[in-house]
Amino acid sequence: MKQDASQARRLAALEKKVGITWVPESFWKTGEWLDQLTGPYIVKNHPGKTIFDLCPDPGWLDTHHAPAEEVEYINRKIKELGWKTGHDAHHGDPHDEGARSMGKTH
């Protein structure tokens, strides 16, 4: 963390020395970008739901947000490690009442 902060300070000093001044676009100033983030969008427009509830099928996120080669590699590694993923990880497992759930408040 200290190394990152030190590097950021050095970079800022170099930018100042060579005359680089960053000016944020109005898009960033108004907060419109927040509307495009998945989490806040789902909370606002689909209360009580998660991104997984809104997916067309269990594997949709894997195939629509990563290149096919990457998905294939990840799936191969998951299989090699014997991990369960997505909806398969929960089928047949008893529900943990202590787990956080958006569907029910206590």
Image: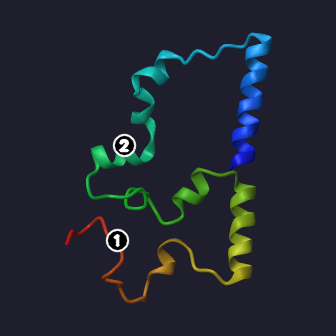
Q: Secondary structure at mark 1?
A: loop
Q: Pinpoint residue 76: horizontal percent, then vertical percent.
A: 73, 72
User: Which residue has dot 2 on it?
Assistant: 41
Q: Are marks 2 and 1 in contact (CB under 8 Å)?
A: no
Q: Nearer the viewer, residue 82 or 55?
A: 82
Q: Residue furthest left?
A: 106
Left or right: where does residue 38 sit relative to residue 77? left
Task: Quadrant for the C terminus, please.
Answer: bottom left
Q: Is residue 60 above or below residue 35?
A: below
Q: Residue at x 27, y 58 (%)?
A: 48
Q: Is residue 16 above or below residue 95?
A: above
Q: Nearer the viewer, residue 65 or 36?
A: 36
**Residue 100 tag number:** 1
Q: Residue at x 23, y 70 (%)?
A: 104
Q: Pinpoint residue 80: horizontal percent, then vertical percent.
A: 74, 80
Q: Is residue 101 above or below residue 92?
A: above
Left or right: where does residue 30 sit relative to residue 2? left
Q: Amino acid at mark 2?
A: Tyr
* Of pointers 2 and 1, the one earlier in the residue sequence: 2
Q: Nearer the viewer, residue 54 or 11?
A: 11
Q: Residue at x 72, y 43 (%)?
A: 4
Where is residue 34, by image quadrant? Answer: top left
Q: Secondary structure at mark 2?
A: helix
Q: Pinpoint residue 56: horizontal percent, then vertical percent.
A: 43, 58
Q: Amino acid at mark 1?
A: Arg
Q: Nearer the viewer, mark 2 or mark 1?
A: 1
Where is residue 22, by image quadrant? Answer: top right
Q: Label 2: how many residues lie within 10 Å, few (<14), some (14-19) or many (20+)? A: some
